[in-house]
């Protein structure tokens, strides 16, 4: 009886089988190297929101100091919050811890605006008793889509408006309450980007008076429309235009 020889697969067949096995392993992820860990990106502006840094009402004192709250790392927002701490909170803290206050009190009022494109905070601060000024005014403006702070200098440049030109326009538009009044110094202290893209500059205007002492007053000026409006230092804007905070801010509190 003749013995049958066992057929040994050819080298080409063995290589083909090995290649198919390797492909199968790759498809299942076996033996694949994990990608190196990536550093998480900075927190975007779309998930940021306006929040409270300090809110207190003690006696005649009003302390409404806001900030922008976010998750992760965001240098632009961090810079805004740092400026708020240094420019406004520190002044309030120094006043509060400055010993006997006597008949003095401080009002720090906040006005928040949350929109699809911007987070904007306007704040004023004044220490009483005082005569001749409405106090100080600031704005902090953040572009949510660009994830960037918007600065007053950039806005003024975009409007092609210098301080001298601004002063001249305010003098032309100013409507005195009496013939003895006129405009002295004018300085832009902040701004609001309004719905539709128009800008309202927040001004401190020195109103000279030949029959009384001068007074530094708050005004809003819209360069695109040429509108100049006096601002009420106890409530700068219409409450319905601003955020409803919880607990409510002074413009929303029941008197």
Image: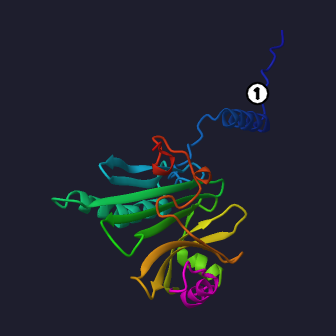
Image quadrant in which you'd find residue 129:
bottom left
Specify whether residue 127 is painted magenta.
Answer: no
Does residue 57 lie above or below 121 as drawn? above
Does residue 20 lie above or below 232 as drawn? above
Q: Residue furthest right?
A: 1
Specify whether residue 163 is painted magenta.
Answer: yes
The percent coordinates of residue 236 (x first, y second) are 53, 61
Image quadrant in which you'd find residue 165:
bottom right
Q: Quadrant of the C terminus?
A: top left
Q: Nearer the viewer, residue 219 or 37?
A: 219
> How packed is label 1: few (under 14 Cα within 10 Å), some, or many (20 or more)?
few
Does residue 217 lie above or below 64 as drawn? below
Is 18 placed left or right of 253 in the picture?
A: right
Q: How many marks?
A: 1
The percent coordinates of residue 214 (x first, y second) are 42, 82
In this view of the protein, can residue 45 be seen by the observer? no
Residues drawn in magenta: 161-180
Q: Which residue is mark 1?
A: 8
Q: Nearer the viewer, residue 190 or 132?
A: 132
The secondary element bearing badge 1 is classed as loop
The percent coordinates of residue 97 (x first, y second) are 20, 57
Q: Residue furthest top?
A: 1
> What residue sits 83% from the left and 9% below the top?
1
Is 28 placed left or right of 133 in the picture?
A: right
Q: Residue furthest left?
A: 99
> What residue sits 36% from the left and 59% below the top?
107
Colour theme:
rainbow
Q: Nearer the viewer, residue 247 or 59?
A: 59
Is 116 placed left or right of 65 in the picture?
A: right
The percent coordinates of residue 193 (x first, y second) are 63, 65
In this view of the protein, can residue 154 be seen by the observer? yes
């Amino acid at each position: 009886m003749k013995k049958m020889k066992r057929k040994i697969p050819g080298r080409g067949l063995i290589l083909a089988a090995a290649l198919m096995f390797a492909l199968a392993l790759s498809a299942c992820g076996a033996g694949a190297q994990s990608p190196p860990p990536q550093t998480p990106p900075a927190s975007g502006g779309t998930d940021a929101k306006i929040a409270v840094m300090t809110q207190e009402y003690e006696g005649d004192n009003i302390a409404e100091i806001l900030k922008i709250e976010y998750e992760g790392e965001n240098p632009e927002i961090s810079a805004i919050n740092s400026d708020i701490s240094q420019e406004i909170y520190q002044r309030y803290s120094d006043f509060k811890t400055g010993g006997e206050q006597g008949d003095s009190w401080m009002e720090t009022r906040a006005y928040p605006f949350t929109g699809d494109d911007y987070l904007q905070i306007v704040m004023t601060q004044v220490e009483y008793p005082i005569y001749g000024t409405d106090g100080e005014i600031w704005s902090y403006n953040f572009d949510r889509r660009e994830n960037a702070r918007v600065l007053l200098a950039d806005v003024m440049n975009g409007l092609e408006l210098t301080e001298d030109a601004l002063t001249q326009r305010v003098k032309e538009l100013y409507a005195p309450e009496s013939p003895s009044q006129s405009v002295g110094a004018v300085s832009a202290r902040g701004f609001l980007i309004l719905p539709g893209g128009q800008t309202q500059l927040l001004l401190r205007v020195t109103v000279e008076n030949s029959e009384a002492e001068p007074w530094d007053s708050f005004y809003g000026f819209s360069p695109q429309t040429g509108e100049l409006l006096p601002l009420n230092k106890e409530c700068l804007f219409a409450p319905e235009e601003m955020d409803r905070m919880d607990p409510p801010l002074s413009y929303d509190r029941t008197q």
